[in-house]
Image (cartoon, grey):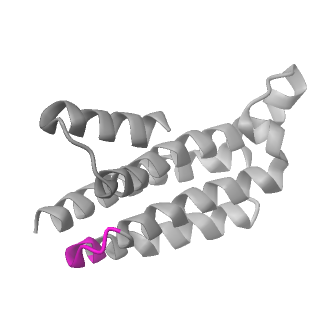
């Protein structure tokens, strides 16, 4: 909620003093990708966190659930970009191959230190997606 809705909608409201449905839809993709970074980081640490009693989302959901959460965050970013019904928001589909690659690796069971490169790639995905999304919305 904070990384997408609160930050984006709040910033928009402060600058325009108005709200609309479109800004809520636009807020979701970036929030979802920010949360995907947190989700993959928690997935990486899940085993150790469980041993020491930390109740992160990954621990609560279990291995398979945490992996599904990560993938659903990637999917929701793309879906909500398309829900803007802005034709140039389709530019975000250029980031789809990276999203699919990350989703496949996570679903295949990559774990522990092997998730570190995927964490970095998730950050790169967010940057790429943001640039494409911003360009698409401007055009």
- Residue at image coords 38%, 70%: 83
Decide if residue 133 is on the left or right side of residue 62: left
Q: Which residues are magenta?
A: 84-90
Decide if residue 28 is on the left or right side of residue 119: left
Residue 23 coordinates in the image, percent (x, y):
29, 52
- Residue at image coords 49%, 50%: 32
Residue 95 falls within the magenta-colored stretch:
no
Quarter of the image for residue 7 reads: top left
If the image is split into quadrants, where does the C terminus sit?
bottom left
Q: How many marks overall? A: 0
Q: Nearer the viewer, residue 108 or 96?
A: 96
Q: Nearer the viewer, residue 25 or 117?
A: 25
Decide if residue 52 is on the left or right side of residue 68: right
- Residue at image coords 81%, 37%: 59
Residue 88 coordinates in the image, percent (x, y):
20, 75
- Residue at image coords 42%, 52%: 28
């Amino acid at each position: 909620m904070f990384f997408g809705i609160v930050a984006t909608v709040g910033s928009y409201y402060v600058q325009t003093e108005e709200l609309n449905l479109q800004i809520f839809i636009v807020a979701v993709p970036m929030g979802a990708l920010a949360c995907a970074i947190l989700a993959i980081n928690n997935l990486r640490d899940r085993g150790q966190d469980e041993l020491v009693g930390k109740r992160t989302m990954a621990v609560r959901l279990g291995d398979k659930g945490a992996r599904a959460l990560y993938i659903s965050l990637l999917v929701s970013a793309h879906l909500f970009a398309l829900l803007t019904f802005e034709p140039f928001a389709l530019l975000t589909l250029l980031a789809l191959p990276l999203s699919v690659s990350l989703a496949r690796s996570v679903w295949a069971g990559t774990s522990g230190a092997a998730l570190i490169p995927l964490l970095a790639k998730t950050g790169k995905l967010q940057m790429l997606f943001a640039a494409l999304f911003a360009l698409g919305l401007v055009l």
